[in-house]
Image (cartoon, rainbow, N blue to C red):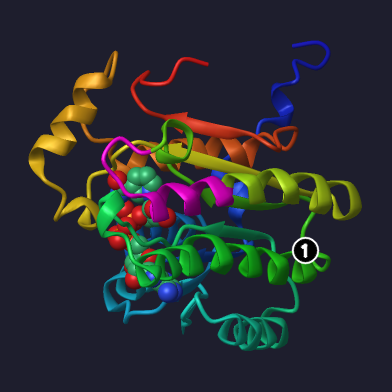
Amino acid sequence: MNGSTGFEQYVTMEEYLKGRRCIITGSSGTIGKIFATFIASRGGIPILVDVVPQEETEEAVASYGGEYSAHRVDLSDVAQIKSFYAEIAERYDGLDLLINNAGLLSEVKLLDMTEDNWDRVLNVNAKGAAFMSQGAVGLMQHGSDDRQIINIVSLAALVGGLYVGAPYVCSKAALLGLSRNYTVQAGKEFGIRVNSISPVIVSGQMISNTPREAIDGVKNLMKVWNQEVPPVHLLYVFEMLCRTPSMTGKNIVLDGGILLE
Ligand SMILES: NC(=O)c1ccc[n+]([C@@H]2O[C@H](COP(=O)([O-])OP(=O)(O)OC[C@H]3O[C@@H](n4cnc5c(N)ncnc54)[C@H](O)[C@@H]3O)[C@@H](O)[C@H]2O)c1
C-alpha cells in the first residue's frame, strides 16, 4: 500500500499501559478491582489504595506477575494522603495515571441528614479526591508523554440524585467541579488531562443495600439498556480515554439515555 493511512498511529492498550504507574483508589471495591486487574493484565503498574484490606484485588493483580503495590490510606485524612505520596515519590519517582474511584454512598433522607453524614461522604468523595489529585499533579511532572486523571463521578451529580441523598450528590457535583478546575489548571501548566466517567447504577457491592424499588425506578427511566451498568462498561470508556490524548475536560455519562445532552 502506498502512503499513510493514519492507522499506523493506532495504539493498543498493551502499548499504552506498558510500564505506566497507575494509582487506583477504592481498589478493593467493585469498580476499583476491575480497573486494577485490567491495568495489570495489560502490563501497567497498579498502585492500589483503599482504607480496607484488599487481598482479593492483590491476588488478581499479582496473578499477572508484574509490579504492583498496595497501600492502606484513609482518603478523608489529608495527612495520610501526603505520607502516601512521599512513599510513592520515593518508590516510583513519578506517576502517569490517577483514577479517583473511592467513594461512599449516602441514601440519607433530607430530614434525617446529620453533620456527620455530610462530613463523612464529602471528606472522602470530594476532599480526598482533591488532595489525591494535587499530589498526583506534583508527581506527574516526572511522568510519561500522556498523563491523566480520571474521576469516577456519578449521574447523580447531573440529575440531583434519583434516590440518593444530598451528601452524595453534592460530593459528586464537587468532584465534577474539581475535574473542570483541574482540567484548566493541570492542563495549561503541566499538560495533564482530566476526564470523568458518570455512570448510573453499577452492579456491585455499593448498591447491595439499596431497595429494589429504587433501582427499578432508575432502570425504568432509561431509553435503552434498562439494567444496571456492568463494571466492564467503565473499562471500555477507560480504553477510549487512554487512546485519545486529544480528549480532556470531558464527562462521559453511562446512563442508558436518561439524560439527553
Ligand atoms: N455502584 C454504583 O452504582 C455507582 C454509580 C455511580 C458512581 N459510582 C462511583 O464509583 C466509585 C466506585 O464504586 P463501587 O461501585 O466500586 O463501590 P464500592 O463500594 O465497591 O467501592 C468503593 C471503595 O472505596 C473505598 N473507600 C471508601 N472510603 C474510603 C476512604 N476513606 N479511603 C479510601 N478508600 C475508601 C471502599 O473501601 C471501597 O473499596 C465510587 O466513587 C462511586 O460513587 C458507583
Which percent across, then down, holds residue 84? 60, 84
Q: Residue at x 48, y 46 (%)?
A: 153
Query: On the image, numbered disc 1 is attached to which residue?
Result: 143
Quadrant in the picture for residue 220? top left
Which percent across, then down, holds residue 166? 39, 50
What residue type is disc 1 on?
Gly
- Residue furthest to the right: 189
| Mark 1 crowd level (few <14, some 14–19, many ≥20, 10 Å Cα) | many
Q: Residue at x 72, y 82 (%)?
A: 89
Instruction: Give the overall secondary structure of the magenta segment.
Output: helix
Reply yes or no: does residue 144 show up in magenta.
no
- Residue furthest to the left: 212
Reply above or below: 1 against 93.
above
- Horizontally, residue 151 falls left or right of residue 192, namely left
Q: Is mark 1 within 8 Å of ligand 1?
A: no
Magenta region: which residues?
161-175
**Picture quarter with the N terminus:** top right
Which percent across, then down, holds residue 229? 29, 35
